[in-house]
Amino acid sequence: MGNHTISNGENYFNHESNRKDDLHMEILLVEDDKTIASGLEYSLQQDGYSTVLCHDVASAQKVLAEDVDQFALCLFDLQLPDGSGYELCKMVKGRRDIPVIFLTVIDDEVNVVMGLDMGADDYITKPFRVRELLSRIKSVLRRYQKPSQARAIIDIDHVRINTLEGKVHKNGAEISLTALEYRLLLIFGSHIGQVLTRNQLLEQIWDVAGDFVNDNTLTVYIKRLREKLEDDPGHPTLIKTVRGLGYKVGD
């Protein structure tokens, strides 16, 4: 097992014996709490990933500048001693479209929305169960790797989804959606006229049981989709709430 030290105090862990032959997944973990970081790196390695660990923004920026292409996914603590995970997310998304998950003690909508608007794919609030984080990681990676099986064109009122191009248009104008917003819209588009419960939506988004999902994330994404796609988000006609049951798109 190699444990190679690189500059600025970050450690590069590459435990080949724990990796599956077909996985080859490298994760950048940026966490200033060394106790949490140590536990996370161990759990990630046990699950078959190799990791690069940094404890601050500066060292993470150096690693990303040298070779962002080596990473399949990034885990960023939101609050770091010399900056924030937002800076790192912006840097990553500006160079490559790879998934970013925020680790945060902040559990309010403003900060969650800010991260999601920057292109982050998920967030998880401390304290969290390692099993939950691993499930989130697998789900996000699947969303990036698995092509949609939906039909080529899906029309929902004034919204058109082109699944071959991965584009969404409202009244002919292209609308920019994050990866998870697009995934959620595809789920609605594949179940037109059906009432989908929150649990059904969560299970299809994360591919894990609803117990392992922070329900706030779904609320945020429904709100963001409505703001981008509805003519009057305060009185939605596209993504309709069915009181006591869930949501419905189309008739």
Image (spheres, rainbow, N blue to C red):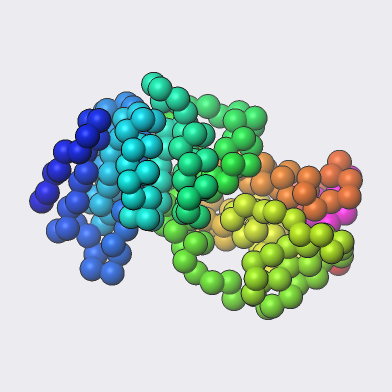
Report the residue at 76% width, 59% height from top: 174
Between 25 and 89, which is closer to the camera in this rendering? 89
Residue 141: x percent and y percent? 44, 59
Q: Specify whether residue 113 is painted magenta.
A: no
**In the figure, residue 162 lies in which quadrant?**
bottom right
Residue 181: x percent and y percent? 65, 53
Report the residue at 83% width, 57% height from top: 238
Residue 101: x percent and y percent? 47, 44
Going by the image, does 13 lie left or right of 175? left
- Position of residue 243 relative to residue 196, above or below, is above
Q: Is residue 103 visible in this depiction of the protein?
A: no
Going by the image, does 187 lie left or right of 92? right
- Position of residue 241 relative to residue 39, above or below, is below
- Highlighted magenta segment, given as a residue range: 235-241
Report the residue at 23% width, 68% height from top: 21
Q: Going by the picture, which residue comes out furthest to the bottom?
A: 151
Q: Going by the picture, which residue comes out furthest to the top?
A: 81
Q: Going by the picture, which residue comes out furthest to the front?
A: 66
Going by the image, does 13 lie left or right of 213? left
